Amino acid sequence: MGRPRIIFFGYSEVGYSCLSLLLERGDNVVALITHEDNPHEKIWFKTPAVAAREQGIPVFTPESVNTPEWRERIAALRPDLILSVYYRHMIGTKILALPPLGAWNMHGSLLPKYRGRAPINWAVLHGEPRIGMTLHRMVKSADAGAVVDQAGVDIGPRDTAEQAFRKALPCARAVLARQIDSLLAGTVKETAQDESQANYFGGRKPEDGRIDWTRTSGQIFNLIRAVTDPYPGAFTDVGASRLMVWWAESESPAAQGKRGAPGEILFVTPLVIATGDGALELTKIEWRDAPGPELKVGQKL
């Protein structure tokens, strides 16, 4: 019997890392299905297409695999196993049912928490102290299938989403390395998720970075670090101008102990804004359409 045929669905550096592992092992990856890079997105990560093309693996970038044409093309590849790693689209159940060894996904959270899109950004935004990667069976509902394995890592209260991502990245490769032989042998063990602990979050849009100054300093700080560069960033509007906030501090001498109406400018140099429970010094800012308007003490954002 020949080596099991693997179709790899993937994107992002997690996809690159996991596909590289399979190729280093000499596993029989017959195709990569991935995404075209979005010209409006800052591509700051390696993508699996790089690893696939280096090894002569066919690369496909359909807008949707859930069409009759693509279901037929995937079926014609005769997959024994499907592995999805940071692939951004839902894969229909007709495709999931094709491989006799099952279809499996690597998700960027410690399931059942943070199902859905952008799990690391959401975890940072909510101040989670620990994140990780989970390998699970793919089912109709997103990230709801039985868990095979997971690995976690602690993150700090000042880590940005990118820093958190870098810490969690090795977890995906470690989990896959532990489980790939069992997946290919059809002997993997699964544990159903505890639905009472599950939560789901959707994809994030640039508009989701808008700062609500009535929130606490801690909540606003977590938003800023969850979406700061290389993500689209947090912002506040001043009239018709947009002020991007790439970093802030609540414990700086200028902000500590200060109070005011939420969104009120308490100081201009340095720039200190009142929050729902204190104040933040905006330490790294950028006017989207420079130069911005003149700011004044007492002005409300």
Image (cartoon, helix red, strand yellow):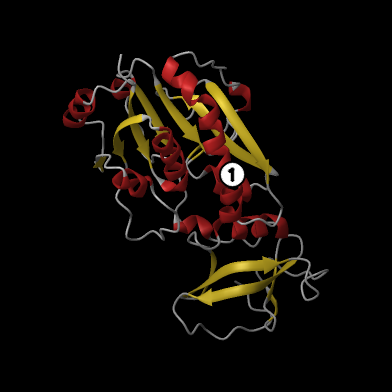
Quadrant in the rendering for residue 264 = bottom right
Circle 1: residue type = Ala
Residue 78, image x and y in percent?
Answer: 24, 22
Task: Tell me which residue sits at (61%, 44%) in the image.
Answer: 123
To which residue does mark 1 refer?
A: 168
Q: Residue 147's spot in the image, x, y percent?
A: 54, 23
Residue that appears at 49% across and 19% down: 182
Q: Residue at x 32, y 60 (%)?
A: 39
Does residue 122 appear left or right of residue 207 in this picture? right
Badge 1 density bin: few <14, some 14–19, many ≥20, Cα 10 Å: many
Q: Is residue 277 above or below residue 103?
A: below
Image coords of residue 130 (percent x, y): 68, 41
Between 241 and 43, which is closer to the camera in this rendering?
43
- Residue 69 figure quarter: top left
Q: Nearer the viewer, residue 226 or 262?
A: 226
Q: Is residue 299 positioned above or below 22 on the image?
A: below
